[in-house]
Amino acid sequence: MASSSDSDSARPRRASDFPYRSELLANLSALILLWDSPAFQGEILAKTGESIDQQSHATLRHLLAWGPMRPTALSNVLATGASHVSKIVRRLEADGLVQRTTDPSDGRATLISLTKAGEEAAHSVYELGDRMIAEVLDGWSDDDVREYTGLTVRFVQDAIASAERMLERGLLPFKK
């Protein structure tokens, strides 16, 4: 039987959980915490019949998006320790989905890269994401999807540009 705290941590988040002044930020926080939750992703994968666990899915997704990575870089993007990444990589190696090679720019370093089977598996991971967003948008009109997508593209471009500026100078003073 799940305890009260277990059910609280597994429940979908709502914008009202986050006391931001910005309704947009509160809603984004709720969505990010839900979709980025390993427990949420793992449960969906299990119910979908996927044989690869959530951490392996994330590894495949990042390697397809960004190409071969050193284990330390992979640890950073997965937000986990090097020993955990080693376990994930060993599982994926055993399944023939990734391989370790020597970094051509530094013969002392190792790169983790996808095999041909790993590329196919990674594309399947992205297909699951496509199925997920299709289910979310089921019932939306084509015009609504196009408008929302266009605004999201603009928002992401502006957020990335702003993040780069914030990294250089910090946050601007709060305007009331």
Image: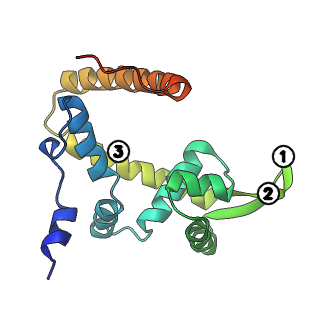
The residue depicted at 84 percent of the width and 46 percent of the height is 105
> For the residue labelled by badge 1, is the local secondary structure a helix, a strand or a loop?
loop
Where disc 2 sits, the SS reads: strand
Most foreground residue, 19 or 30: 19
Between label 2 and label 3, give the one nearer the viewer.
2
Q: Contact, CB < 8 Å: mark 2 with mark 3?
A: no
| The C terminus lies in quadrant | top left
Which amino acid type is marked by label 1? Ser
Element assignment for label 3 = helix
Label at residue 130: 3
Residue 97, position as x, y percentages in the image? 60, 64
Disc on res. 105: 1
Q: CA distance from mark 1 to mark 3?
A: 35 Å
* Kind of residue at disc 3: Asp
Q: Quadrant of the N terminus?
A: bottom left
Q: Position of residue 44 (x, y in %)?
A: 28, 62
